[in-house]
Every structure is written in structure tokens, then in C-alpha cells.
């Protein structure tokens, strides 16, 4: 390439340096056929030359080779100057003085740090090799100078933007700004992944926190029709990135919240020892049960509260078969979630075209929980801890029976998913009463009892937090409930214990609260 071509500041030039090269040759070819000069770096240069596309190596412009095994490729004033230069006589004169070609278009994406995250157990020394330095620097420079330099970072923008540039000679300022916003969002997301990797395993809360995510889909609307909504993914290994919608309408904002709750519950029942089914409505379990078959587990879960289950989301811990599907087809549900489905089950559901069928891998555990507040957000560790029954403390003389212990273990897995103040009642392997989201704990007890359509004698009542007074024990005793489970920790614990002892109730303290707001 002659010096005159390289120093002609009126010529159009694009810097293309990408990790994801699929499709890049078609836009590079379009540009060169329309008089553009392509500048590039190592891997991308080889890729384009192999496809017979004219390209100038960046080092030919900077007169400085790539060094440190490719760690330094694009960081040079003769590259950053042309990207940051405005198309003013003063800036263009300076580019001419230093024989630096003005760069009008930057197409760059980064080393695949996100794809390397599953290997982070290999240590930071391994991960740092996937941290891109030059790419984000170039992108930030181009985005800063968006009025004079177009920046593209996403594959889906390659073709439409380049076609518009070739056809019209340019894109409008609003589109330039939108691409710059996407570029800054991309660099922010990339840096947040790196920061998260470095923070992994470190104690304490970070001084700075980015709640970054990649948009997976736009939603029809948010929680209500007047609110906009979208799904963002923070971790490519999340089941939300890998689930498959096998049939049905598009998912709503509320669907996603509820089936995420279903997924969290199912993750506690992945051993495969028993069939388990859960029904969630408005992010509260309203039905749940274990059974000797999927059909039995579902029927028990549904019978626990048929009224609330209507229009809910149903989950299973095992691949779903035909018998359970036949049982469900009589009832209106929004979504069915399972790790897999038999062909026979899918044939049953085909008759209900609007029913969303989700195939979802189980076992993923989120580590953090973020809630927005005006002007900020609060961050906490996810409530993933679950004490074993053997670590509970029996506070009264009555010992639970073997069947009651099974119900305690089932209920203990469920209570932490109920909105506080939360009370649940479990009997014979099924959830039969829920009192959720009450400001008064005794009201939650009364609601759970009132909701139950089954005899309560021999049932287990569980609370997400301590009983502040003995009145809840009085009410439970009136209905012949035989076991109560709570964290303990009230200043009136002794009164509660004495009342439970008086009525012959097994009272167990877990020592762990499970508030859920």
C-alpha cells in the first residue's frame, strides 16, 4: 500500500480486529469494493488475506510490531489518534503531519473471557490470558468520538450497519450514538465479568459493584402492561441461557420470575430418590408434594390448593412422562418446567397450543441476590444454606415420628421460598396450607390453617422466623398439629416452649431464619 494512500485523510478506513470472525469477510469485501481501506491485526489479518481481501496490517501504519506474544497490538498513538480525531481542519492537519490515516469505522470484539469463566478454577494466572486490553481501549476511544468514528461491537450489527454505510455513505447521528452506547455497555459488561472473577473467593463486599448482564430477549411488557421489560443474563452457564421452549406463547416477565422460582425449588430435589412436583404462583409455592410416581406427586401438589394452582407454573424434578401430562391437561397452567419430556408427554401437550413447555437443566445455584432501591441497590449472598434435620434442636419432650420427620425435611426445603411472614403446613408428603406475606405471624398461621382442606391432626407446621408469642402454638394445638418448626431467637422463646410442652407438641429450633421479602 503506497504512502500516498495511507496518508490520504479523505479516504475511508475501517479498523477490523475481531475474535468472532464468522461473517466478517462479507462486510470487509463490501467495504473494499466500495473504496474503503481495511486495517487489521494478527489473526483477523490472516483470516481476511486467506479469503483474498486486501488488508493493511496495523503494524505497517504504526511502524511498530506486535510484541509480548500479542499482548500489545493496537496500543499506539498512530492508531488511537486517527480513531479519536475529529473531522476538523486542525485535527486532520495533525493526522497529515504524522502520516496517520483517519479511521472512520471500528469493528472490534474481545478475547472470550466469558467463555473461559467455566475454567476459572484453574486460577487467576490462567484467566488473565483471556483479558483483552487493546480491544476495549480501541472501542472506548471510538465510542467517545462517535460523531466522527462509527463503532460496532456486536455480530448482529455487522451487516445492517455496513450495508447502510455503503448504500448511504454514512449513518445518522442518533444511530452513531446508539452504537456508542452499546459499545460502552459492552466494555462495562466485559470488565464486570473480569472484576467478578477476581473477587471470587474474596471475603467482604466489593467497593464497587456492577449488575451487568447481556440481553437475551425483549419481553412483551414488564410486570404490568404499561411497563417495558427484558431478560438479561449475567452468566452464560445459567439455565436461563440454556433452557428450551418446546411449545407455547412467548414468555412474560411474570412467567420468568415464577419459573425461576420453580427452578430454585427443584434444585433441592435433584437426588432422584422420589418424584417431586411443585406449583408456584406469584413467586410463592402454593402446592408441592413427593410421590411414588409423577402422577401422584402432581396430584398431591395440586390437591393441596386447587384454587391457587389455577394459572400457576408446574415443575418436576424428573423427565416428564405421559401419565402426569394426561393428568395436567385437564387444568389451565401457564408453564410446565421439567429437565426433559418423553415424546408421549409432548404429544399430550400439543393439544394446548398456548401452554408453554420449558425444558430446563437443573442444579445451577446463584450466589448473589440483588434488589433495586431508589438510586441504588442492595446486595446480599443468596440464601443457599439449608441446615440438616440432625442439626435441629428438640425443645420439648415429644419426639417426632418417622413420618413426621419426612414431612419436616420436606417442609424445611419449602419454607424458605415463601414470602415473609411465612407459614406452611405439611402432612403425608404434601404441602396442605400456606400463609404467605403477612405482616403478623399469627395471621400467617391462621391463614395457613384456614387454607388447608385436609385434617390437620399429625401435621407439621413450619415458620420462616421465630414465634414472637405463644399464641401461634395455642392455635396450632386447637387443630391437633403435632410438630412445629421455627428458628428460635425470640425474647419469649421460653413461653413458646412451655406452651408447646403443655400441649404435647414437638417443637424444634433450627437456628436459621429464612426471611424472604
Image (cartoon, grey):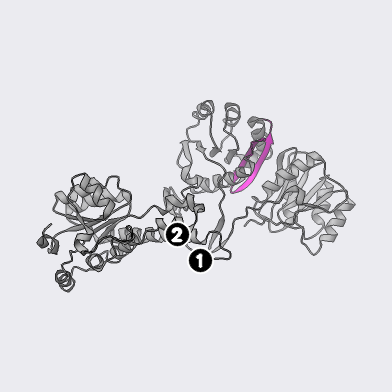
Disc 1: CA contacts within 10 A as few (<14), some (14-19) or many (>=20): few
Which segment did they paint magenta? 271-292
Name the magenta segment's main secondary structure. Answer: strand
State how far apart marks 1 and 2 are (Cα).
Answer: 22 Å
Q: Residue furthest bottom?
A: 90
Q: Which marked residue is nearer to the observer: mark 1 or mark 2?
A: 2
Q: Determine whether 295 is above or below 114 in the image.
A: above
Tell me, yes or no, if residue 404 can be seen here. Answer: yes
Q: From the top left corner, tell me how far across and down residue 239 is, in percent.
A: 51, 45
- The secondary structure type at the circle numbered 1 is strand
Q: Quadrant of the N terminus?
A: bottom left
Q: Residue furthest front?
A: 68
Total residue callouts: 2
Q: For residue 170, which numbered disc appears in the image?
A: none
Q: Residue furthest right?
A: 502
- The secondary structure type at the circle numbered 2 is helix
In depth, the one of 336 and 39 nearer the eye is 39
Residue 278 belongs to magenta span: yes
Q: Quadrant of the C terminus?
A: bottom right
Q: Determine whether 46 is above or below 65 in the image.
A: above
Q: For residue 376, which numbered disc appears in the image?
A: 1
Q: What residue does disc 2 label?
A: 194
Res 327 quadrant in image: top right
Q: From the top left corner, tell me how far across and down residue 66 is, in percent.
A: 28, 60
Tell me, yes or no, if residue 232 can be seen here. Answer: no
Q: Earlier in the sequence, mark 1 or mark 2?
A: 2
- Give the residue drawn at x 22%, y 68%: 85
Amino acid at each position: 500500500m503506497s504512502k500516498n494512500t495511507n496518508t490520504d485523510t479523505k479516504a475511508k478506513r475501517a479498523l477490523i480486529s475481531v475474535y468472532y470472525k464468522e461473517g466478517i469477510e462479507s462486510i470487509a469485501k463490501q467495504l473494499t469494493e466500495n473504496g474503503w481501506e481495511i486495517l487489521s491485526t494478527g489473526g483477523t489479518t490472516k483470516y481476511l488475506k486467506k479469503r483474498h481481501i486486501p488488508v493493511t496490517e496495523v503494524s505497517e501504519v504504526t511502524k511498530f510490531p506486535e510484541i509480548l506474544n500479542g499482548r500489545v497490538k493496537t496500543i499506539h498513538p498512530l492508531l488511537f489518534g486517527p480513531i479519536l480525531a475529529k473531522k476538523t481542519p486542525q485535527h486532520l492537519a495533525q493526522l497529515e503531519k504524522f502520516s496517520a490515516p483517519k479511521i472512520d469505522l471500528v469493528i472490534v470484539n474481545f478475547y472470550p473471557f466469558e467463555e473461559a469463566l467455566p475454567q476459572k478454577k484453574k486460577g487467576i494466572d490462567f484467566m488473565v490470558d483471556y483479558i483483552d486490553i487493546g480491544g476495549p481501549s480501541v472501542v472506548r476511544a471510538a465510542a467517545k468520538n462517535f460523531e466522527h468514528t462509527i463503532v460496532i461491537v456486536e455480530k448482529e450489527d455487522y451487516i445492517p450497519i455496513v450495508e447502510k454505510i455503503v448504500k448511504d455513505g454514512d449513518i445518522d447521528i442518533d444511530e452513531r450514538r446508539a452504537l456508542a452506547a452499546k459499545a460502552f455497555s459492552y466494555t462495562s459488561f466485559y470488565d464486570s465479568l473480569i472484576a467478578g472473577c477476581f473477587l471470587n473467593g474474596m471475603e467482604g463486599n466489593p467497593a464497587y459493584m456492577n449488575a451487568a448482564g447481556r440481553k437475551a430477549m425483549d419481553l412483551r411488557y414488564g410486570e404490568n402492561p404499561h411497563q417495558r421489560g427484558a431478560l438479561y443474563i449475567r452468566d452464560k452457564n445459567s439455565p436461563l441461557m440454556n433452557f428450551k421452549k418446546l411449545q407455547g406463547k412467548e414468555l412474560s416477565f411474570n412467567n420468568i420470575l415464577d419459573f425461576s422460582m420453580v427452578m430454585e425449588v427443584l434444585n433441592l430435589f435433584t437426588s432422584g430418590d422420589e418424584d417431586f412436583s411443585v406449583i408456584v404462583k406469584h413467586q410463592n409455592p402454593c402446592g408441592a408434594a413427593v410421590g411414588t410416581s409423577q402422577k401422584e406427586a402432581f396430584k398431591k401438589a395440586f390437591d393441596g390448593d386447587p384454587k391457587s394452582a389455577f394459572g400457576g407454573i408446574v415443575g418436576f424434578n424428573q423427565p416428564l412422562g405421559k401419565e402426569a401430562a394426561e393428568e395436567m391437561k385437564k387444568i389451565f397452567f401457564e408453564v410446565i418446567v421439567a429437565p426433559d419430556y418423553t415424546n408421549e408427554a409432548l404429544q399430550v401437550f400439543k393439544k394446548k397450543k398456548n401452554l408453554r413447555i420449558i425444558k430446563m437443566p437443573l442444579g445451577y445455584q446463584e450466589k448473589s441476590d440483588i434488589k433495586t432501591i431508589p438510586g441504588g441497590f442492595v446486595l446480599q449472598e443468596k440464601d443457599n444454606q439449608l441446615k440438616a434435620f440432625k442439626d435441629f434442636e428438640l425443645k420439648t419432650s415429644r419426639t417426632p415420628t418417622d413420618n413426621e420427620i419426612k414431612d419436616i425435611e420436606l417442609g424445611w426445603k419449602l419454607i424458605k421460598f415463601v414470602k415473609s411472614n411465612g407459614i406452611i403446613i405439611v402432612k403425608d408428603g404434601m404441602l396442605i396450607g400456606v400463609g404467605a406475606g403477612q405482616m403478623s405471624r399469627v395471621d400467617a398461621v391462621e391463614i395457613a390453617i384456614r387454607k388447608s382442606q385436609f385434617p390437620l391432626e399429625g401435621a407439621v407446621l413450619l415458620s420462616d422466623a421465630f414465634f414472637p408469642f405463644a399464641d401461634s402454638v395455642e392455635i396450632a394445638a386447637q387443630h391437633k398439629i403435632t410438630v412445629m418448626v421455627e428458628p428460635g431467637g425470640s425474647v419469649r422463646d421460653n413461653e413458646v416452649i412451655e406452651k408447646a410442652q403443655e400441649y404435647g407438641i414437638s417443637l424444634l429450633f433450627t437456628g436459621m431464619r429464612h426471611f424472604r421479602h
